[in-house]
Amino acid sequence: MANVETERPEFRELPGPAEPVDPVDPAERPLSAGHLIVAQLEREGVRRVYGVPGESFLDVLDGLHDSPISTVVTRHEGGAGFMALAEGRLTGLPGVAMVTRGPGAANAFIAVHTAYQDATPMLLFVGLIPVADRGREAFQEFDLTGWFGSTAKKVVTLDDPTAAARVVAECVHVARSGRPGPVVIGIPEDVLTLPAGPSGGVRPLAVARPRAAEAELKELVRRFERARRPLVVVGGEEWTAESGQELMRWATRHSIPVLADFRAYDAVPHDLEDGPEHGLEGTGAYVGSLGYGRGDHAARLLDEADLTVFLGAPRGDVLSDGYTRGLDSETVLVLPGDAQGHSGRIDQFVSAHAPTFVLDLVTTSASPDADVAWFGAAREAQARFTTPAPAPAPTASGDSGGDTYVDLTAVMAVLREELTPDAVITYGAGNHALWPARYLPHRAPASLVAPRNGAMGMGIPAAVAASLAFPGREVVSVAGDGCFLMNGQELATAVGHGAVFVALVVDNGCYATIREHQEGAYPGRPSGTRLTNPDFAAWARSYGAYGETVTSDRDFREAFLRARASGLPAVLHLIQDPTVRAPATTAV
């Protein structure tokens, strides 16, 4: 039987009033359901809620008035949802968003879908119409379960005010347990004002972190020792500095290449700065990521491996190039729940928390005899793939960067030198994401927030949340012009709440990903992909942020240093050659 470890959130007593306002014991004074929701969120360790206010949850807003929980007022429900998702991704505790019924819930839906496909813990509270008005097509009425039932781990409506604390505790537990994900909680406006009971709430529920049984570890060790070309693929949430570093030392020692799932490549450090201290040479075992923008060498590794061990990441659509790669190799799958999202062969399934499983694996006596030449070739290919290439040759327009356009490859070369080792990188979806995914190394866990489901508009809200969650860490967001303006108004939220980051807005005047598909399938017939953009630097300054336009590779470094030193949320408007679609090709 597998062992199970439990993790119990810190239990904090709620502060009482400074002075009693009546003879009733404060601990016995009943709270409204809305206030009890806030009290329970405090006990769960929640530090921020993100939202757009609505009349359907006024009592919760009133409870937040005197709460140590910060209320981050956003400019759009999509931004609130993405901020909550980013907080869940970075901290492991569900991020919390609050929106109103109907249109507000519709705007937040994108973040719930992203959290579900990305397996990220998140809570979405949705204010609802009064109970008595249900089924009468009341103002902004909708079916909460009908909307969210197919893209959330759980959907629940609070109809009993006395159950408020219990429902919150159970929903936090569901969001964090097994395969993490979003939970949606409907809160009818009339129920929120009803008495809910004493202010104490309930004790947070322990979250199981299942561990592999000794027999399961021994079986995996035997598989490693038989394999000549074993491969490890990492992904999922809750990787720590210890688990990532230990895996990389172990894999390097045994010449086992490590790949990362799409947009999960902060799970492990990309190099081993302390390698010599452990008798290891080279940059480590990390050899790239799978999915969109991956190097050809990464795809070949998936094809050639005779044993593939998935740690926290199922073999899904994007990872396997549309279910075409690696489906038939000997496969071990380690996930904390079931095999949801996995396709193809499974020879051994271990229900375990992947980062904890790693710490158990590296203490075994496994001595794989892997193909050293295969491993070395993979490392060399990854080094070539991630080394910025020289500036591209002039295009048909006669420009190659220089004083007219900014070459993003040159930008990434500067960032590789300037960024702090634990910097957080955020971005949404689009061709602009190919550059940071390829060229920016990650050395610390919780250093990437990007949508694995390809949602646009996430980068700026994620940067706001990252700065608020980790005020001591550097945050940089890379945004396309189309992606940026989907939630760029959250720059106002950053200014209002003291979030600090540098956003690079790549302006090529089109939805470049779709334009690239058109150029392949319908050459010479662009349609519906042109963009008309503002002066993004002036736009940023109008919010009270820092803004500067950059048109030359030579000017980027100093512009970045000025933006960083401003102490403000900053936008660098980078003018890109509109014909460029991806980094220059490097043979690997």
Image (tube, rainbow, N blue to C red):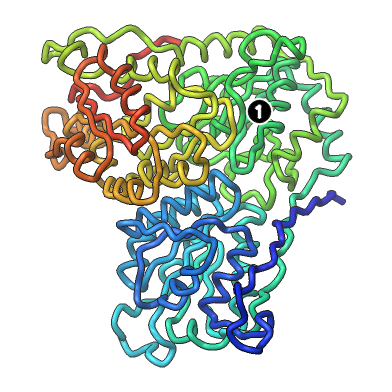
Count of numbered tags: 1
The correct choice, above or below, for 333 with respect to 439 in the image is below
The front one of 505 and 586 is 505
In the rendered structure, the answer to whether residue 131 lies left or right of residue 410 reads right
Q: Residue at x 56, y 88 (%)?
A: 195
Indicate the quadrant where residue 479 lies. Answer: top left
Residue 466: x and y in percent read 47, 42
In the rendered structure, the answer to whether residue 227 lies left or right of residue 71 reads right
In the rendered structure, the answer to whether residue 563 lies left or right of residue 509 reads right
The correct choice, above or below, for 243 with respect to 48 in the image is above
Q: Which residue is mark 1?
A: 232
Indicate the quadrant where residue 154 lies. Answer: bottom right
Q: Element at badge 1?
A: strand
Identity of the residue furthest to the front in this view: 19
Residue 333: x and y in percent read 68, 40
The correct choice, above or below, for 560 with respect to 587 in the image is below
In the rendered structure, the answer to whether residue 141 lies left or right of residue 2 reads left
Indicate the quadrant where residue 177 lies. Answer: bottom right
